[in-house]
Image: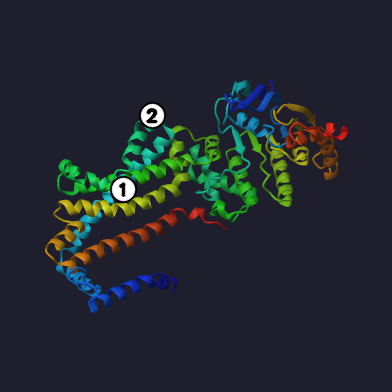
């Protein structure tokens, strides 16, 4: 039995209107414990919706998601989340944000301080403990979000295009840091992105989704060594891009597919 | 320097007013000159019971305002998130919003007597709705993902209202409270006008009745100065509370 089991899950928005939006269409997916799964797909394909359903923030219109054998009914600290736009608490300092989940667990103050400092150091924000998020750059805010999630030590990490707002350099550094963290501490990771190279670099398995209505188009195992050169990542990424390209075009030009256009 | 520049128009008006009084353009019996008002102010300050009136008024105002803040914020957040609270209070808020609260003062005096309570209640009523409305709108506008974040970090149920909704809506709540602060003087002074034994409204009213117009104007000036100082202090406090909003 897989750790996270997604069975025939659909999500329809505006179901009772003339034009309902089918965000996810009968998605089946098993995620094994301690594996890193990345999901790629064109924008609007429902990949974030899928992640939000696993998080327990929204409920599927049909189908079932089980986490450790039990149906997901609400969010919980067992599933840490990093949102696309960080969702930091702007009225709290960096330390306040990182300690928030620990305080909610009623961890004593001294211990809280120690744990938060560990993660703040890990994401290289030492010296910014007392800064408010608004005063930090996008990349720094992103790292606060990461530290806030990791501090609670959830065994599953759900990440929704967390590096989407970062510049290319910061992004590469963050990808490497995240991969290190995931390998060092056994975590089940579900990482949503629209960047194919990022999906290949981070994932042990890559799930490719179709344009809306979002279905699973392919699941690929990535067997690259940790020290594989970026070139090998690029090759694998090209392979996935071939699968994905049509879907991206469909998402951009509704009704058209790349092959049809090429043939015409 | 900018602070001085800011008040130049005010200085000019006062200077013009003084000159108009001196050359006889206005009847100083009806509109005392700024200098005469200054004299009246000096008289009031040395008469001894000015501080009593100020103390009484500030007490009534603060009591009403704090009551309105506590109840208004709770009601606003409750209405935004609890269906039955909204069902019960929304029609009441809609109906009473355009009502001038000062129209209720005679009734309040009938109910609560001529002492502190009728004035406190008048201030409370006048300040309540801006706080309710700003809290209601503020908490409804809270980014869903902030709430999701808190839930995934272990915050549940009613705690979300305080830990997330209230904090995130604080900028709007505090500006609603600033409007309430400004309104509180209207309610305070008008309630003290009608029947009172002390307070600045009472002072202005009784000086006016005694024909001491410079004194009456001085009383009005004191209310304005208190209101102005309170607003400045409030803004300083608000900016400190919201210091996290500052951008880099």
Q: Answer with left or right where residue B218 lies relative to residue B227.
A: left
First-in-chain label (2 vs 1): 1
| Residue A41 in view | no
Q: Answer with left or right where residue A69 lies relative to residue B8.
A: right
Q: Answer with left or right where residue B197 lies relative to residue A189.
A: left
Residue A168 coordinates in the image, percent (x, y): 73, 50
- Per the image, the residue denoted by label 1 is B66
In the foreground, B110 or A92 = B110
- Per the image, the residue denoted by label 2 is B84
**Residue situated furthest right in the rendering:** A263
> Spatial distance from mark 2 to mark 1, Cα to Cα?
25 Å
Query: Residue at 41% of width from left, 55% of height from top?
Result: B238
Q: Quadrant of the N terminus of chain A?
A: top right
Secondary structure beneath disc 2?
A: helix
Query: Residue at 70% of width from left, 47% of height from top?
Result: A174
Relative to B212, is B174 above or below? above
Residue B242 coordinates in the image, percent (x, y): 46, 53
Relative to A174, is A209 above or below? above
Query: Residue at 26% of width from left, 76% of height from top?
Result: B20
């Amino acid at each position: 039995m897989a750790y996270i089991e997604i069975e025939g899950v659909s999500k329809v928005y505006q179901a009772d209107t003339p034009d309902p939006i089918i965000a996810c269409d009968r998605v089946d997916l098993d995620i094994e414990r301690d594996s890193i799964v990345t999901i790629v797909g064109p924008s609007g394909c429902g990949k974030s919706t899928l992640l939000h359903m696993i998080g327990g923030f929204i409920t599927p219109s049909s189908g079932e998601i089980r986490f450790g054998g039990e149906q997901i009914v609400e969010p919980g600290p067992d599933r840490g989340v990093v949102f696309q736009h960080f969702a930091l608490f702007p009225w709290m300092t960096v330390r306040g944000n990182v300690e928030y989940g620990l305080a909610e667990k009623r961890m004593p103050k001294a211990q809280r301080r120690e744990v938060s400092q560990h993660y703040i150091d890990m994401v290289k924000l030492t010296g910014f403990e007392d800064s408010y998020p608004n005063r930090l750059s996008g990349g720094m805010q992103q790292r606060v979000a990461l530290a806030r999630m990791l501090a609670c030590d959830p065994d599953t990490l759900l990440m929704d295009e967390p590096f989407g707002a970062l510049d290319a350099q910061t992004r590469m550094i963050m990808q490497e840091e995240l991969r290190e963290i995931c390998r060092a501490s056994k975590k089940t990771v579900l990482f949503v992105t629209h960047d194919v190279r990022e999906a290949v670099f981070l994932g042990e398995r890559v799930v490719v989704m179709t344009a809306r209505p979002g279905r699973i188009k392919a699941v690929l195992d990535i067997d690259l060594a940790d020290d594989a050169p970026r070139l090998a990542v690029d090759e694998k990424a090209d392979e996935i891009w071939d699968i994905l390209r049509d879907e991206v075009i469909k998402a951009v030009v509704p009704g058209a597919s790349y092959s049809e256009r090429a043939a015409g | 320097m900018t602070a001085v520049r800011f008040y130049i128009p005010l200085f000019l008006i006062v200077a013009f007013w003084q000159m108009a009084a001196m050359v006889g353009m206005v009847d100083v019996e009806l509109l005392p000159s700024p200098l005469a008002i200054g004299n009246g102010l000096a008289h009031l300050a040395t008469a001894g019971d000015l501080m009593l009136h100020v103390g009484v008024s500030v007490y009534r105002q603060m009591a009403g305002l704090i009551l309105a803040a506590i109840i208004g914020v709770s009601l606003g957040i409750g209405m935004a998130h609890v269906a039955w609270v909204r069902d019960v209070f929304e029609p009441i808020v809609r109906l009473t919003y355009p009502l001038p609260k000062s129209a209720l003062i005679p009734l309040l005096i009938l109910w609560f007597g001529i002492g502190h309570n009728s004035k406190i209640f008048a201030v409370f009523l006048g300040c309540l709705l801006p706080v309710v409305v700003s809290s209601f709108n503020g908490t409804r506008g809270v980014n869903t993902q902030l709430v999701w974040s808190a839930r995934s970090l272990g915050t549940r149920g009613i705690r979300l209202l305080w830990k997330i909704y209230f904090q995130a809506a604080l900028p709007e709540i505090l500006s609603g409270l600033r409007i309430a602060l400004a309104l509180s003087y209207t309610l305070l002074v008008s309630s003290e006008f009608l029947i009172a034994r002390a307070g600045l409204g009472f002072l202005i009213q009784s000086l006016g009745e005694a024909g001491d117009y410079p004194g009456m104007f001085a009383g009005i000036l004191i209310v304005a100065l208190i209101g102005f100082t309170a607003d400045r202090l409030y803004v300083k406090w608000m900016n400190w509370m919201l210091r996290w909003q500052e951008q880099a």
